[in-house]
Image (cartoon, helix red, strand yellow):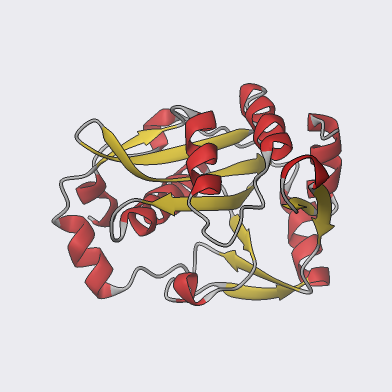
Amino acid sequence: MLTINILRVAYDDGLFPMAEGEGPKAEILWYRPKKRAVFLPESFHVPRRLARMIRGSDLTLRWNEDFAGVIHECGAQRKEGSWINPEILRAYTEWHEAGEAFCLSVYRGEVRVGGIYGVQRGGVFMAESMFSREPNASSIALVALVKGLWRAGIEMVDYQFENPHLAKFHPVLLTNKQYMARLEMLREKKTVLRAEDFLTSASEAEQ
């Protein structure tokens, strides 16, 4: 059974879990990519077209509200089968209740149309998964999250695997040795994620 202590130790060692298989036969596997994709304050880039769209957006943002709902939607949206099984959903929701896992949601009116969640280890934030019910909602969530994390004092945002969708934000690829060196340096940093560091209006995220 996944516990908060197991997750803490694993993340501090550069590992993260993913479920493989369906139903009671699903098993938790642990991953440590050879190349780690991360965002750093000096290199994070918002494409011009996306920035214009965000400035004109009427979407709103909510920090750390309904974590269980956000992680559930992240898992439900994956058509090829989710790595977020009930065991992971339960464990990360408990981690959220312990104050170390967080989410950010994007709303149109009172309808949640996008969101992202992850976990904090000192001055590092591990972005785990995101979902979108309309175009660009997850990108807005990512931009708002990352910029709020910079304001809070986070110095590295880890999103684990490189992928084409996130390449436009100019990630940095670290070897496992480079990643672990940064993680060991930053994980004891006293960093508090406060609601006031995260905007409530998407249009302000690119001003």
Q: Can residue 14 be seen in this view?
A: no
Image position of 89 with respect to 17: above or below: above
Nearest the camera: 17 or 120?
17
Identity of the residue drawn at 28% across and 54% down: 134
Identity of the residue drawn at 53% across and 38% down: 72
Nearest the camera: 176 or 77?
77
Q: Position of residue 43 (x, y in %)?
A: 49, 71
Q: Quadrant of the C terminus?
A: bottom left
Image position of 144 with respect to 50: above or below: above
Relative to 119, 151 lies left or right: left
Relative to 155, 24 lies left or right: right
Relative to 43, 24 lies left or right: right
State how many labels appear.
0
Relative to 20, 145 lies left or right: left
Q: Is residue 194 visible?
A: yes
Q: Quadrant of the N terminus?
A: top right
Image position of 166 with respect to 101: above or below: below
